[in-house]
Image (cartoon, rainbow, N blue to C red):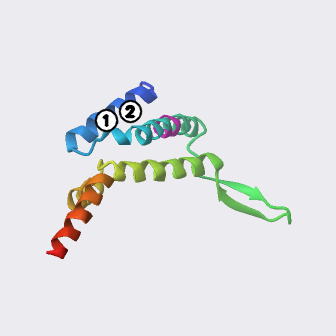
Amino acid sequence: MAKKLTEKAVRNKTIESMTSVGTYKDEFLPTIERYAELFVEYNNLKDDWEKDGRKITEPYTNKAGATNIRKTALYLALESLRKELLELEDKFGLTPAGLKKIKTEGLKTTAENKLTKILEGMNAME
């Protein structure tokens, strides 16, 4: 079995990756912390899912007595966490699409946006 990653290790690796692509800012640290928690939880659930035989679906009998096939709770949790992790990686610029969007739109701060609006307003008055 692979070595377990800690939240600290994931946080540090994420900061390192973001720094290397030029998207890291200190303001992202709380979000990076949540990302690290989700990442570790995802890996723990994935280990449980693999131990459980990687079941994706299971039979389910509803109140009316009809039996249907549904996704297992473990697989649904993995699916949800996977989407959340990918969304955060995208926002951090750690996916090709996310990095492209950041390079196109930039990492503007509120102060920069306000200053730009003020300067644009002054130029319009001239």
Q: Position of residue 113 (x, y in %)?
A: 28, 59
Q: Which SS type dominates the magenta stretch? A: helix
The residue identified by callout 2 is 11
Furthest residue toward left: 126
Q: Position of residue 70 (x, y in %)?
A: 66, 58
| Residue 55 shows in the view | yes
Type of amino acid under label 2 = Arg
113 to the left or right of 52: left
Name the residue rendered at 35%, 53% in the picture: 90
Residue 2 appears in the figure? no
Quadrant occupied by the N terminus: top left
Q: How many marks?
A: 2
Question: Which residue is painted at 36% across and 41% down in the image?
Answer: 27
Q: Quadrant of the C terminus?
A: bottom left
Q: Which mark is residue 15?
A: 1
From the top left corner, tell me how far across and down residue 56 is, in percent. 58, 51
SS assignment at label 1: helix
In front of the other: 101 or 56: 101
**Residue shown at 39%/37% (left/top)?**
29
Q: Nearer the viewer, residue 8 or 104?
A: 104
Left-right relation of 60 to 28: right
- In the rendered image of this protein, does residue 13 appear above or below residue 24? above
Q: Residues within 10 Å of mark 2 (few under 14, many from 20)?
A: many
Classify residue 105 by image quadrant.
Answer: bottom left
Q: Residue at x 38, y 32 (%)?
A: 11
Q: Which mark is residue 85?
A: none
Please, what is the three-letter code of the amino acid marked with disc 1? Ile
* Secondary structure category for the residue under label 2: helix
Give above or below for 81 relative to 115: above
Cβ atoms under marks 2 and 1 closer than 8 Å: yes
Range shown magenta: 38-42
Q: Residues within 10 Å of mark 1 (few under 14, many from 20)?
A: some
